[in-house]
Image (cartoon, rainbow, N blue to C red):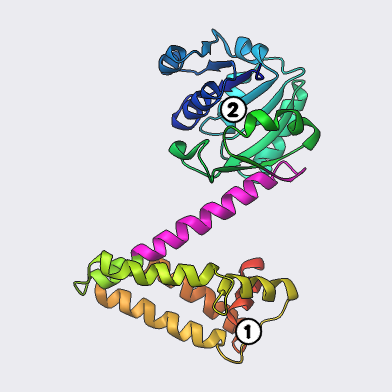
Amino acid sequence: MNSSVTVIGLGPMGATMAKTFLKNGHPTTVWNRTASKAAPLVDDGATLAATAADAVAASELVVVSQIDYQAMYDSLKGVGLEGRVVVNLSSGSPDELRRAGEWVSGNGGVLVTGGIMVPPPGIGQPGSYVFYSGPEEALDPHKEALAELGDVTFVGTDLGLSSLYYQSQLYLFWSTLTAYMHGVALLGAAGVPAQRFRPFAATTLSELTGDGPMGFLKHLTEEIEADISPGDENSLRMQAVGADHVVEAAREAGIDVAGPTALRDLFWRGVDAGDGANSLSSVINVIRRPA
């Protein structure tokens, strides 16, 4: 028989997790501050716990998916966590997750933190994965159950690491798509439809991530790791001047310039710090040492 699981928090993410556990044969107990949200899951075979304490008592593995870590404190206040592995997949800052580990251990349990890298419809689907950090010996016995949600990607014992990976991925995701929207708006001001621009944007993204001669992400990573920034062919000063032109084009088009301006200013700070003759990878120095 598959191991039992308790899911606390039945928003879109938590409800989908519970449904995924049920679908894969795991006896699943659920609890939510608004109990009515559990009704569809109960129809699918879940057990609705009357209290958070009852939910925790039902399973060694307690998966928490709530709006933030304060919600966990509110929900589990006064609940003994002895013998329980609490896997919290809520969002929070790295230091917040580290403090939560102390809170959980103070109540007798062990915390494993996680960042799930797909939206609710992607949970349990091919390609889904979750970053986990914390004590690996607590995670190991539950990897099979947690794998129902997505690939179990353990990133280290520091409870804050899952959040660092999660936030880094989100920032990359959001900034890339937002930059695409800026491009769409810029061209749209001249009457160019988004579908006309999309293939060119797709080519750029492919070149960014590829392993060929144009594999910018690969080359950038190698330069950062080696602490070198050869700018013979394309210096940061050239990039900064080009960024000036992007800001001016956005202003002329009548679209928002905040994003391009922030990028332009980052480049010029690198130039002003003495990296004008170096490559784009030298911007990491500005990012690591903010003004």
- Between marks 2 and 1 in the image, the one whose residue lies nearer the viewer: 2
Q: Residues within 10 Å of mark 2 (few under 14, many from 20)?
A: many
Q: Is residue 40 above or below residue 234?
A: above
The part of the chain drawn in magenta is 153-181
SS majority, magenta: helix
Task: Name the amino acid, label 2.
Answer: Val
Q: Secondary structure at mark 1?
A: helix
Q: Nearer the viewer, residue 38 or 248?
A: 38
Q: Secondary structure at mark 2?
A: strand
**Picture coordinates of residue 244, whole percent (x, y):** 41, 82
| Residue found at the very far top of the displayed protein | 50
Q: Is residue 133 left or right of residue 281?
A: right
Task: Name the amino acid, label 1.
Answer: Asp
| Residue found at the very far bottom of the displayed protein | 232
Q: Is residue 102 above or below residue 282?
A: above
Q: CA distance from mark 2 to mark 1?
A: 46 Å
Q: Which mark is residue 64?
A: 2
**Picture coordinates of residue 126, whole percent (x, y):** 52, 43
Residue shown at 30% from the left, 66% from the top: 184
Residue wearing tag 1 = 275
| Residue found at the very far left of the displayed protein | 191
Quarter that holds the C terminus: bottom right
Quarter that holds the N terminus: top right
Residue shown at 45% from the left, 28% from the top: 11
Whether 169 is among the magenta residues is yes
